[in-house]
Amino acid sequence: MNRKQFIASLSIGALSAPSLLSVNSKDKVKVALPSTESWEQIQKQFKVLKNHIYMNNGTMGITPKPVLKALEEAFDTVALNGAYPSDTKLLKNRLATLVKVEPSTIAITKNVTEGINIACWGQNLKEGDEVLMTKHEHVGGCAAWLYRARIHGIKIRTFELGKTAEETFSNFKKAISPKTKVVAVPHIPCTIGQILPVKEICAEARRQTITSIIDGAHPLGMIQFSIEDIDCDYYAGCLHKWLLAPLGLGFVYIRKDKLESTNLFNVGAYSLPIFDMTAENLIAENLVQETQRYSTGTFCGPLYEAGERAIDWYEAIGPERIEKRVKELSLFTQEELEKLNNNIEILSPKEERSRGAQTAFRFRNKKADEFVAFARTAKGSFTLRHVHEAKLEGVRISTHYYNDFAQIEKLIECVKEYIKKYESPHLYH
Ligand SMILES: Cc1ncc(COP(=O)(O)O)c(C=O)c1O
């Protein structure tokens, strides 16, 4: 049964209570799935403190209650049956379908940083080789590269993000030099949330035999995309942001023809098909011929199961419906903020193809971290993110489908109050 047929089979009205549907993967945990419910009803499936408005999904997603319950049940099952988790395939297969690659090309990690490290340390680079990045990298996307610059003498160079995809792509092309060996950029940067033209970047990189590594912390669960279509060499993502899985789940994709040349530093049970410490020749004869080789020992089976349930949840609501909703919320945010543009500057692009679910802005005369602290204690008690990267001094508003338009209106009121208090022109000296 495909997703549409599956949802249709539930046959419940738009205003009915969330349907309890048993989704059994190997008869383990069950989760109540939303299908045609309204956003208000879906919103009720999230534990959020009363009088607190969470708008920082870009740092960490809030897991729906049924998925959290599934996690607890999966832990119980492990304890009750003494069942040691050994099957990584179930989650891998589901993920591979979502991002449209073969399951053999991905491995589950605990976060994006781990995937970036696998890709970064996997490259044979020598002193003077250049890696092209943006100024908007998250520490998880750039720390490994910066460290390699320190210990191996590789050179990190950056290019500016443009206001449009075309401008960004042109900046990237201009920054390429004969020494550029790798381009390592985010699909959606953590700073201002714009969707980068990664497909064009990867195609150009391939044309110039430059390895492409994409930091995909944000797209999964926010926008629909296909890694096969982007055609990068490496892609590192996570499930604990927009897919709303519990914390501690990521994945790394390695293009098939890059597997052999990608160095492996963490080697374990999932890396070797066989080992024999009684053999004459004590050596790892072979490696597993899949990206799986980058996973090592015991993993958190219940967490993997909850990851599958988060995918059930996401698919039941519908990727298309979610993408539309999150983009509508961010467009509304941007349009409301634009009305305040005497006092603030919007940092996120307006161009349709570059717009995701996040909006960043900055005050003309006030530091962003002070506003983030103000908003936390103001009426509404908002959680927002201070954007310090690229010296932007911005505020990031990161709303998911569990947020709503009324919450955004409340935030705008909070911004206005702040402006009135601290930003009014007569206060400038
Ligand atoms: C663009 C980007 N890259 C990497 C990371 C690091 O992700 P993780 O904490 O899953 O390693 C983040 C986290 O916010 C991010 O926004």
Image (cartoon, grey):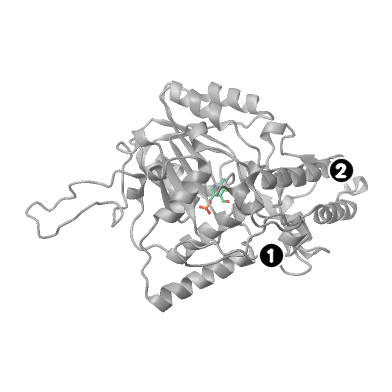
* x and y percentages locating residue 268 in the rendered image: 29, 56
Estimate how packed mark 1 is, as few (under 14), some (14 to 19) or many (20 or more) residues with alpha carbons within 10 Å.
some
Residue at the image point whose x is 47% and y is 72% from the top: 75
Relative horizontal placement of residue 70, taking residue 233 as reference (left or right): right
Estimate how packed mark 2 is, as few (under 14), some (14 to 19) or many (20 or more) residues with alpha carbons within 10 Å.
some
Q: Work out whether residue 330 or residue 65 is closer to the camera in this orientation and state it.
A: 65
* x and y percentages locating residue 57 in the rendered image: 65, 54
Is mark 1 in CB contact (under 8 Å) with mark 2?
Answer: no
Task: Quickly name the residue at label 2.
Answer: 340
Circle nearer the N terminus (1, 2)? 1
Label 1: which secondary element: loop
Residue at the image point whose x is 48% and y is 69% from the top: 74
Q: Is residue 54 above or below residue 252?
A: below
* x and y percentages locating residue 428 in the rendered image: 87, 46
Amino acid carrying mark 1 in the image: Gln
Relative horizontal placement of residue 362, taking residue 229 as reference (left or right): right
**Callout in the foreground (1, 2):** 1
Q: Work out whether residue 106 or residue 399 is closer to the camera in this orientation and state it.
A: 106
Q: Is mark 2 within 8 Å of ligand 1?
A: no
Amino acid carrying mark 2 in the image: Leu
- Spot the residue most to the bottom: 80
| Residue 173 visible in this rendered orientation of the protein | yes
Task: Quickly name the residue at label 1.
Answer: 45
Quote the CA–CA distance across marks 1 and 2. 34 Å
Q: Is residue 109 above or below residue 47?
A: above
| Residue 393 visible in this rendered orientation of the protein | no
Q: Where's the C terminus, which quadrant? A: top right
* x and y percentages locating residue 213 in the rendered image: 46, 37
